Image (tube, grey):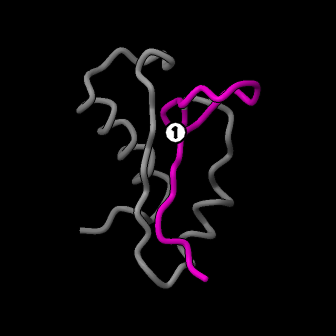
């Protein structure tokens, strides 16, 4: 009865673009607020297809952008 793993990406609301979170139009606030209430750790999987994004960075830079987006907005990054 608990969420254990999630597959997350953003889009423009028209097609399944697999954008980096924050690069599309999805409002993640209600979703991540709900996940903060979960009792257990949740594994987040981000499927961001570089060819479909407007970001031409390396995979490490894409990962950094995702982590920055999450850590600035939500209490999801644990030390």
Stretch in magenta: 1-22
Identify the residue at image location x=45%, y=38%.
Answer: 47
Q: State yes or no: residue 15 in magenta.
A: yes
Mark 1 surroundings within 10 Å by alpha-carbon count, few (fewer than 14), some (14 through 19), many (20 or more): many
- State whether residue 25 is above or below residue 43: above
**The C terminus appears in which quarter of the rendering?**
bottom left
- Per the picture, the main secondary structure of the magenta-coloured stretch is loop
Residue on which the image places disc 1: 21
- State whether residue 60 is above or below residue 2: above
Identify the residue at image location x=44%, y=44%.
Answer: 46
Position of residue 10 measured from the top left corner of the image (x, y, whole percent): 59, 36
- Outermost residue on the right side: it is 14
| Left or right: 63 in relation to 42 | left
Dot 1 falls on a residue whose secondary structure is loop
Q: State yes or no: residue 76 in magenta.
A: no
**The N terminus appears in which quarter of the rendering?**
bottom right
| Left or right: 57 in relation to 74 | left
Identify the residue at image location x=64%, y=55%.
Answer: 29
Position of residue 74 measured from the top left corner of the image (x, y, whole percent): 49, 59
Position of residue 2 measured from the top left corner of the image (x, y, whole percent): 56, 79
- Outermost residue on the front side: it is 1
The picture quadrant where one finds residue 38 is bottom right
């Amino acid at each position: 009865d608990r969420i254990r793993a999630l597959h997350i990406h953003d889009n423009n609301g028209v097609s399944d673009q697999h954008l980096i979170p924050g690069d599309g139009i999805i409002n993640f606030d209600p979703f991540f607020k709900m996940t903060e209430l979960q009792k257990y750790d949740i594994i987040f999987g981000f499927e961001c297809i570089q060819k479909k994004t407007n970001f031409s960075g390396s995979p490490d830079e894409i990962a950094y952008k995702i982590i920055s987006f999450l850590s600035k907005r939500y209490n999801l990054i644990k030390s």
